[in-house]
Every structure is written in structure tokens, then in C-alpha cells.
Image (cartoon, rainbow, N blue to C red):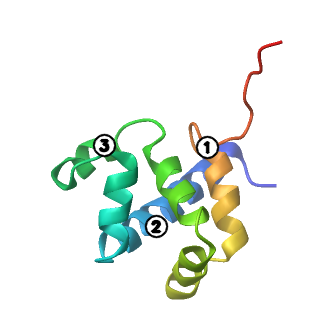
Amino acid sequence: MANPGSMREEAETIAVKALGFVAADPELLPRFLAITGIEAHSIRQAAGEPGFLAGVLQFILAHEPTLMRFAAETGTPPASVGRALRALPLGDDDHEHSI
């Protein structure tokens, strides 16, 4: 099993590929910006924020045709996108619940 550091590094690599994929697509980029509320000129700054890369992967995962196109164009297995999300800060699905 890979160590957590290498898993996170691999996850970040996938997320950066996903960001490039979204940024290069004239239909996806405006949708991503609208959903996130980020302005195009602020993407670089936002990319340094905790949870941003996880948000990019959540965006990819939220629409199966986008996920499949990303996977095909980058050679990234679709299942690895979900694993990458869980390895990133704020990307896990462990949430505290109020009782």
C-alpha cells in the first residue's frame, strides 16, 4: 500500500490535470467558475486554498460524461479520480454529524 504522502502527491497530480482539462474547455470553464463563484483571474490564487483541488475533482465527478471524457483524454482511470478526491484536504466524505 502506498504511503499517505505519495497518495496525496498522486492525488494532487490528478487534480492539477483535471484543472487543466477544465480550464482548456470553453464550455466547462464558465460552468466551473459559475458553480464555484471564482473569477477567472483568481484561479491561481484559489488553487492554493485548502479544498480547491478537491473541488475541481468534485466538479469532474459530478457529471459522468465529463468524468469519462477527462479519463479518456488524460489516460486517467475513472476510479482513480474518486480515490484522488478522498486523498486531498477536504475531499473525504467523513463528516461530523450532530445528534
Residue at x-position 45% and y-position 35%: 50
Residue 64 occupies quadrant? bottom right
Residue at x-position 53% and y-position 65%: 60
**Residue 83 at what x, y percent from top left?**
70, 57
Disc 2 marks a residue whose amino acid type is Ala
- Residue pointed to by mark 1: 91
Q: How crowded is mark 1: few (under 14 residues within 10 Å), some or many (20 or more)?
A: many
Left or right, 82 with respect to 18, comes to right
Disc 3 marks a residue whose amino acid type is Ala
Left or right, 69 with respect to 30, comes to right
**Residue 6 at what x, y percent from top left?**
62, 52
The answer to whether 54 is drawn above or below residue 82 in the figure is above
Left or right, 56 with respect to 7, comes to left
- Precedes in sequence: disc 2 or disc 1: 2
Quadrant housing the N terminus: bottom right
User: How far is mark 3 from mark 2, CA to CA?
Assistant: 15 Å
**Residue 24 at what x, y percent from top left?**
30, 76
User: How far is mark 1 from mark 3, CA to CA?
Assistant: 16 Å
- Precedes in sequence: disc 1 or disc 3: 3
Disc 1 marks a residue whose amino acid type is Gly
Determine the residue located farthest toward the left in the rendered image.
Answer: 41
- Residue pointed to by mark 3: 46
Q: Residue 18: which numbered mark, if any?
A: 2
Q: What element carries label 3?
A: helix
- Contact? badges 3 and 2 (CB < 8 Å): no
